[in-house]
Image (cartoon, rainbow, N blue to C red):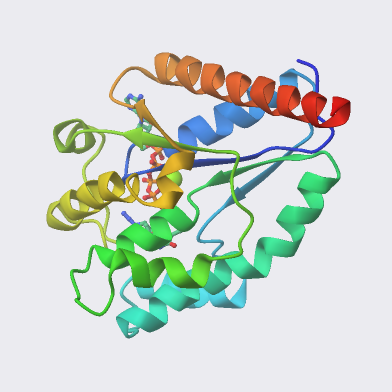
Amino acid sequence: MCQSSRGALIVIEGLDRAGKSTQHARLCQNLESQGHRVNRMRFPDRTTSIGKSIDAYLKGESEQEDHVVHLLFSANRWEAATSIRAAIEEGITVVIDRYYYSGIVYSAAKGRKDLSLQWAREPEIGLPRPDICLYLDISTEEQAKRGGFGNEKYETSAMQERVRELFYKLQLLPDGQDIQVIDAGGNVAGVEKDIMERVEQMMADTRLAEDLRNIL
Ligand code: Z5A
Ligand code: MG
């Protein structure tokens, strides 16, 4: 695959157990085998001090006010923003497992009037915008077949249902233009192929746009 001069920013999103981390690993390997330089990232990044507070909250070891935890998730992305931009400018493709789409939707899914999708979007404005967000869509029935829920804060069927609805609403907002829905209910290899086709198309479109800019 011929490279564009800058790296791409690719995000994988979806509900719990949709197969994000599985597909994230496969996509990174596939891109590397095609000769791309790749940086793997995930959010929350639980290794930083902000990430450790988020980890404690998700595990139920500490309490946080809903707006505060929302801002912690956002700050966890902002602390990586400079390195994401630098990698892309250097020609490295950055592939992220969850990003600000999860940030917006999970907080808004709490159902508070003072924590709407619009409110939740504000702290994310200015973060590097992805070239493509692959939203892995899975039914709650299929989700349940994949080992059920864990013990973290949002891992309940009621919360996952609200999150699923809001991921659809998010597609009607400006951020929605970046989202492509992937049917993640099929087997791993089928989902991997679908993702690869979308990414290759996005990269071809980006190269074409770059060539046009150079001509004009
Ligand atoms: N959160 C937030 O509130 N605000 C934010 O800003 C951000 C996140 C960024 C932790 O996320 C929580 O943080 C999350 C959202 C919130 N809460 N919830 N829910 P996380 O990323 O650390 O955890 P997770 O991604 O939700 O969970 P997960 O279990 O890692 O899901 P996954 O990555 O989508 O799935 P997986 O590990 O690839 O696969 C799960 C299982 O299914 C595994 O056994 C696989 O072998 C199997 N699998 C995968 N694909 C398939 C297919 N195609 N067929 C059959 N089986 C499959
Ligand atoms: Mg995961």
Front in this rendered view, residue 216 or 34: 216
Front in this rendered view, residue 77 or 152: 77
Which quadrant of the figure shows ligand 2? Answer: top left
Quarter-of-image position of residue 200: top right
The image shows residue 209 at horizontal and vertical percentages of 72, 28
Relative side of 91 to 68, left or right = right
In the image, is residue 78 above or below residue 184? below
Quarter-of-image position of residue 152: bottom left
Relative side of 58 to 169, left or right = right
Q: Quadrant of the C terminus?
A: top right
The image shows residue 41 at horizontal and vertical percentages of 62, 49
Quarter-of-image position of residue 37: top right
| Residue 58 appears in view | no
The image shows residue 27 at horizontal and vertical percentages of 58, 28
| Residue 170 appears in view | yes
Q: Identify the residue at horizontal 22%, vertical 68% (top origin).
A: 110
In the image, is residue 81 above or below residue 180? below
* Farthest residue, direction front: 216
The image shows residue 9 at horizontal and vertical percentages of 65, 42
Relative side of 206 to 124, left or right = right
In the image, is residue 113 above or below residue 47? below
In the image, is residue 90 above or below residue 197? below
Front in this rendered view, residue 20 or 125: 125
Q: Identify the residue at horizontal 56%, vertical 73% (top origin).
A: 75
Q: Identify the residue at horizontal 22%, vertical 36% (top origin).
A: 143
Tell me how many marks there are. 0
Q: Quadrant of the N terminus?
A: top right
